[in-house]
Structure formats: structure tokens, C-alpha cells
Amino acid sequence: MKWLPRAFRGELVRVFVPLVSAVVLLSFYTEYKKDNFVAWANLENILLQTSVLGIIAIGQTFLIAAGQLDLSVGTFSAYCAVLAATQVVNGRSEFLAVLIVLLVGAFVGLIWGAVITALKIPPFILTLGGLSVFQSLALVRAKNSPVPVRDSFEWLRTGDVLGLRTPIFILFVVLIVAAVVMRYTRFGRQVYALGSAEEASYLAGLPTTRTKILVYVISSTLVAVAGLILMARIGSGDPRSGGGLELRAIAAVVLGGATLAGGRGTPVGSFLGVFVLGVVQAALTFLNINDSWSDFVFGGVLIVAVLITAISDLRRDNKGQRGPLAQIFSMRGAATAPVQPAENTAIQQRQENT
Amino acid sequence: MNLQAPALDLSGISKSYPGARALDDVSLRLMPGEVHALVGENGAGKSTLIKIASGAIQADSGTVSVDGSVVANASRRAFQALGIRVIYQERQIARDLSVGENVMLDRLPGTGLVSWRRTMSEASERLAVLGLELDPRSSVRGLSVAQWQLIEIARAVDYGARAIIMDEPTASLSRVEVERLFDVVNALRARGVAVLYISHHLDEIFHLADTVTVLRDGRQVFNGAVAGLTPDQLVNEMFGEVSHTVDRTDSCNRDGGPAISLVDVHAGTRVRGVSCEIYPGEVVGFTGGTGSGTTELAALLVGARRPSSGSVVLGGGRRLRSRTGAASAVAFLPSDRKRRGLLLDKTIADNLLLGRLAVPGPPVVMPRRQRKVATMLMKAANVKSDSADRGVRTLSGGNQQKVIIGRWMEVGTPVLVFDEPTAGIDIPSKMEIYATLRRLANEGAAIVVCSTDFQEVGLVTDRVFVMRDGRIVGEVAGALASEQRLIEMEMSA
Ligand SMILES: Nc1ncnc2c1ncn2[C@@H]1O[C@H](COP(=O)(O)OP(=O)(O)OP(=O)(O)O)[C@@H](O)[C@H]1O
Ligand SMILES: [Mg+2]
């Protein structure tokens, strides 16, 4: 595995390999039942279904690593979908529609970032307001019902790039760029520093304001991208299509090793989190389990993940920054990690709180 | 024969952490009315021992007894109930509560319902004993570390306690407060309360303690009466040979104008009209008691606080307006390391590299190269740990401080401002830090040391400004800045 960059190597060996083999086995198994051995088709399906959530979650990773949060991403992606659809319906070119949506995305991020840094408000309530506002704006713009795009955006719906379906291709590009930015650039390292201790970073002289604004811009722009894919995949700009995506995105990011306190989380981890949720979803569908259970299973996965993080935090080794997925899938890691006494972490937690 | 049971008896205590054996078979006995000093280098295991003695963590082996009976697996609260009170090394302040509530945190008066009137009046009394005149209803947020420290001392002092443990209570206090604390400790001794006192200041040990225990690398290397000891013997027990001189070659260069200057700077009531010029190649000290304004001055010098009038001018005439982006002009070491200095959940390496992240540089960073730099800095700053990848949280207090200093080594910033740079640092490391400061000055940097430690400014600086009530009340050459001289200047002005 020498040819892999370090960023992927560690995670890959520990997490990807077992996870991907589990998924491949599952797909083989399910496909076998349907007398169809083409596992890739199954995997591709899961990836297609998770591309929207995946891109949003990667954007949210930047925010959460910086100690920020955006609850408006779900409804904003729906707004972007509607916006793109109405542009095309009004006779604009696809190119122009895409450009407008991306610019709106970046602009909205800029506004969030500017307001949050200028007024020093916690993002939770502010973006919770945004959630409602964008829902409403989407409904108004769409006049309460989906805006069909007919045969526009074919390239995004059914097209291929380099042998991958376009949404999957975009997802991978976003993933790789984000992973590189977070690990190999000063900006990425500043994001983690900001998220671990804002005041210490500020006093050290880091450009905390700029970093904070930038993470909102990045996230909102990625949400706009996700909105476009969302629109293309359903063939219309549906004002109600993004509901709940914000919570799933946050869940996936946490599943991938981040903590809401900030300073932790990687795009690769978040993608894995999304992927696991996608696999669970696919398995439920395949096993013909009543749809009513799907939220239960989703919630269950999240609760278990959080419990695992909490327990591993209590006994984490000194380097330990691995997410719940890594914990589940790396038995070796779990067995050899030096155990730190729980009570010690507990005092430090207390010291933190005071 | 002493028939009294020891107030606190630690016997055969061992404790290991991944990569560090913090304590190895340590025994310590604290008799009622005894003041027992616990000393040793940074990372020797002092704080670990007192955390065990107070139920904050559990030992791997060994026993803790209070008043002759063994206390097993007890919580903090249980130890509290047995009359063991502690002031931990790092501040334990509830930031959203008032000063009074923080003082009375573990004993809010009143039956059933809290009596706020009594809480506040008792808190004021306790603070007044320590010379801290603060409205108990005010917020703790804007206070200095020294004031927080006093609040915690006020919380812990209890004449009915069996033993009071103080982990570096004077690390951020100035001379006057230290003397008040001495009075308090003597009063405790007179009432039969045992005191376990940790400090890196030897004069305090000789002034206060009856007995002393020296730890070194987790092992007990000395235990005996203070009376028969000389300071040199004690230092020798703690560290071996230590040099006590700082090479103070004058490297000040006034040709190119000041590296940074203050022009009639005011900041509320805390700094009132300070003007001075600091040149490349010199180490300048600002000293004074708590509340004299040195900490505020440090914040002003680095752009972390904006002057309400006046200005801070960098070399070349540029005005300093904000901390953001100022790191390439002025590096800063804040006095409150836990809250303002460290990325607590990150590794030693991440913390060491923060200085480099703050100044302009190539947009791409290579993790492998970064690791090398971090390891180099860790050596240069003499941080005691087996790997730069360990969490900075796992370091002892003094070693955490070294990390923050190491952060600014080799960054090449023209001005460096250090607020209480050696709080909690052991003697040999202090001398190393002084040497580092002098080296940075010789290489052309302008160094500002804000410190309430008179010895420190006398030892390392070229010039000292003495401050009181937010004003500069005197200036003296470093070579002439004896403790006595500084005290006189502070008082007479
Ligand atoms: N939670 C922890 N995890 C790992 N190692 C730890 C932990 N806490 C302490 N140590 C290690 O135990 C040793 C003793 O630390 P301790 O804090 O007791 O030192 P100390 O004597 O109080 O030093 P200082 O004078 O710097 O405060 C150090 O090597 C430290 O790195
Ligand atoms: Mg300590």
C-alpha cells in the first residue's frame, strides 16, 4: 500500500478494507439472491443514492472540524434544486443555471460566515432559522410543487465521466480535493486548530475570522452542488426534497470520527459514514423490511456510534482520534490500544468544564 | 515517639501512563500541623501524587490513609468529606458563575435553599483575608489568572480541614499575595491543619516548610527536615548541577529605530497612558504586582486588545490594529496556558506547529516534514515526552508551558511578548528558557517579558519597567534590578 498517500493509507488499512469487503460481500450476497452477480451495479447504486448526502456531509466536515455547524444545508440544497430548475424553465441555459446556483451557494456561505464572525453568535440558532427560511423560499419559488426540468441536465442524470456516473464522479472529486485540502494545506490545519481552541488560535495569530468565513463558503457551495445533483436525479426541482438531510449529514460526520466540539473529523471519515448509512438503507430495502423501521435503524446506528465514541473516549490511547467506524472495524487496533484510565479523562473533562 | 496518627499517609504509591511511569513506589506522610513541601522537576510526578491523594485519580498500587484509616477507591467527594482539600495546578473555575459562588462552590450556605446573602458575605471575608477586594457578585470572566488562583485558595482554606494540598499555588501570584498566602499557611499550621505544598520556588520552601520530599522521575529521592538543608543541597537533590547565571550580552541595536513602541496607550482603567520604545536585540521586562497592568500591556502589545486611546506602532511605522495576521510581526505567549495557550485535545506536535501556522508560509504542508519540525522543536524546547504524537494533555504543567514557548522558536518573528513565561517551570528549565530568550535577542529579536516575578526580570532583562495601577512608575537597568530595588521602586512611586 506504499503507493497510497498517508492520508488514505491509515484509514484504508484500518477501515476501508474491512468495510469495503463487508459491503462487497453484502452486495454479492444480495445480488446472488436476485440471480445477478454484478456487484458493481449494486455498489454503484448505493454510491448514486448517497452522492447528494455525501457531498453535503463533506462540506459539513469542514464546518464541524472548525467548531461550526450549519443546520440549513438540507433545505438550502432543496432551494438550490428549485432555483436551478426554475432558471432552466425560464429559458436560461444549463450552464448559466449551474453558475447562478454555485454563486448563490458561495454568497450564502459568505453571509453566514460574515454574520457569525462579526456578531460572534453561535451558529446553531442562526442556521436553525436558516433552515426554515430556505424551506419557505424554496416553496415560494416553486409555487408549492416540484418544478420539472424535463430533458435538461441529462449529463448530470445519466451521463458518465471516466466511466463513472457523473454524480459519483463529482462525489469522488470533491472527496479527494477535500481530503487533500484538510490534510496537506495550511488552511486545513488552521481549520483544525480553530476547531480545537478558538481563543488559543486567535492569540497565536491565526487568521481565525477568514478561516471561519471560508468554511461556510466551502460548505454552502458544496450544498449548491448537491442541490444540482438532487434536482437532476429526481428530474425536477422539488422544494421538499432536502428535508432531514442536515441531520443525516451531521450524523454521518460524527459517525466518521468528528465531534461536535470541533477539531476532529476528516472528509474520508465522513464519506465512510455516509456510505455506511447508504449500505444500511440498501440492506433494508433488499430485505424488504417495512419502511417504517428505516428511521429506527438509522437512529440505532447513530446511537451505537455515539456510545462507541464515548466509551472509546474514556479509554482512548494518547494518539487516539479514530472514529467509531475505525473502532468497529479494526479489532487489532482496539485490542492493542493502550488503555487510559477512565477517571483521568473524567477529571480533565471536569477541568474543561470549569 | 509521635502517637498522633498522620493526617494523610501515602504509602507505596505507583502509577503508570502509556509511555510514562509517573510514580514508582512513593510514600509520604503528613502529620497534623506540618507544612510539607513536595518538590521536583517538571514531570517528576508531583501533581499525579496529589491527584491520587485527593481521590481525583486512582493509583495502580499503594494505599492512601486519612487519620490512620485506609481510604480505598474513594471519589473526590469522599476525600472532601474526610477533610482533604485541594487546590489543583490548573484552574478550576466555573466561568459562568459569580466570584462569590466560585469561592463557595462546594459549600453553598443555607439549609435547603441557598442563602445568597451569606454566600456573598462569607466569600468577601474569605477573599479579604487574601487581600483580594472584589465584588463577590461580579463575574469571574474578566479576571486575571492570579485572581482566579486567589479565588481557589479562598475556596480551599478551611481551618477545620485535616489536610490542605496546594499544587503550585504561587505560580501566578505576585510578591504581596505570596506573603499573604504565607500568613494563611502559618495560621493553618497553628490550628493543626496539615499542608502539602508544591512549588518550584525554593525560597518559599525554606520560608514555610518543616519537611520536604523530593521526587525525581517518579521516584522519591529525598525526604527529611528542611532545617538541616541548604538551598544548594536541595537543588542538588532535585536536579543535580544547575547553573544560576544567564549570559546577558548586550545586543541591543538602536540604529534602525524601535521594533515596537507604545504611544500614550490607554485601555480602560487598567492601562493608563503608557509610552515606551523597545528595540531589536534587547530583552525588556514589565513587572509589578497583580493588577498593575502588565498582563493587559502584553495583550495590547500583540494586538489582542485594542487600546481605548493611543497606539501601538510596529517597526517600520505600521500601526498594530488586530491580533489576526499580526503573528509575523509579534509572537505572543499568553499567561493562561490551559485556556488561551493550548489546543488541549491536540497532540504535542500540533501545538508546537501552531506558531508556524500563524505566520505566512507555503500553502501546502507535508505531514512528514511537519513531524520532523515538531520533533526538532520538542527537543529544542526540552519537552519531556516519548513522542510528539502524544496528546498535549498528557504532559505535566511545566512541560505544557515549554510547548507554548517552543512554538515560537525558529519562527523568526521580530518581536516576542511573553506573559509569565516561566509560571510552573522548574529551575533548570527556567535557566534554559532564559538562555533561549537571550539567544533570540542576540539574533535580533525584541523580547518583552511581563512578569510578576522580580527575580526573573532581574535575571533575564536588559531594562525593567516597574508598573503600578496601569502606569509605568520607574525604569531600571536589568543588571541593577535586584529584588530589593524593584520592591522599593514599586512601593515608593
Ligand atoms: N493523563 C496522562 N497521560 C499520560 N501521561 C501522563 C498523564 N498525566 C501525567 N502524565 C505523565 O506523568 C508524569 C508526571 O506528571 P505530573 O503532572 O505529575 O508532573 P509534575 O511533577 O506535577 O510536573 P510539573 O512541575 O510540570 O507540574 C509526566 O511524565 C507526565 O507526562
Ligand atoms: Mg504539576
Image: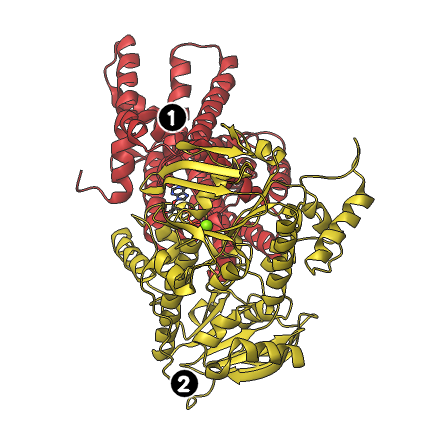
Whether residue A119 is visible: no
Chain A, hue in figure: red
Residue A115 is situated, as x and y percent measured from the top left of the image, at 60, 53
Local packing at callout 1 (Cα closer than 10 Å; few below 14, some 14-19, many 20+) is many
Q: Where does the image place residue B458, in percent across and percent down from the top left?
A: 48, 76
The chain carrying label 1 is A
Looking at the image, the residue that sits furthest to the front is B1
Q: Quadrant of residue A65?
A: top left
Q: Quadrant of the N terminus of chain A?
A: top left
In the rendered image, the vertical position of residue A172 relative to residue B381, given as above or below: above
Q: Chain of mark 2?
A: B
Foreground of the two, A108 or A267: A267
Q: Which residue is mark 2?
A: B252
Q: Residue at x 52, y 61 (%)?
A: B204
Q: Position of residue B279 (x, y in %)?
A: 45, 83
In this view of the protein, can residue B34 be seen by the observer? Answer: yes
Q: Is residue A169 above or below residue B431?
A: above
The residue beneath circle 1 is: A276
Instruction: Identify the hue of chain B.
Output: yellow
User: SS for tag 2?
Assistant: loop
Q: Nearer the viewer, residue A206 or B412?
A: B412
Q: Position of residue B336 (x, y in %)?
A: 53, 57
Badge 2: how crowded within 10 Å, few (<14), some, or many (20+)? some
Q: Which residue is painted at 76% across and 56% down in the image? A: B135
For residue B457, above or below residue A111: below
Note whether ligand 1 is within 8 Å of mark 2.
no
Answer left or right for A58 relative to B373: right
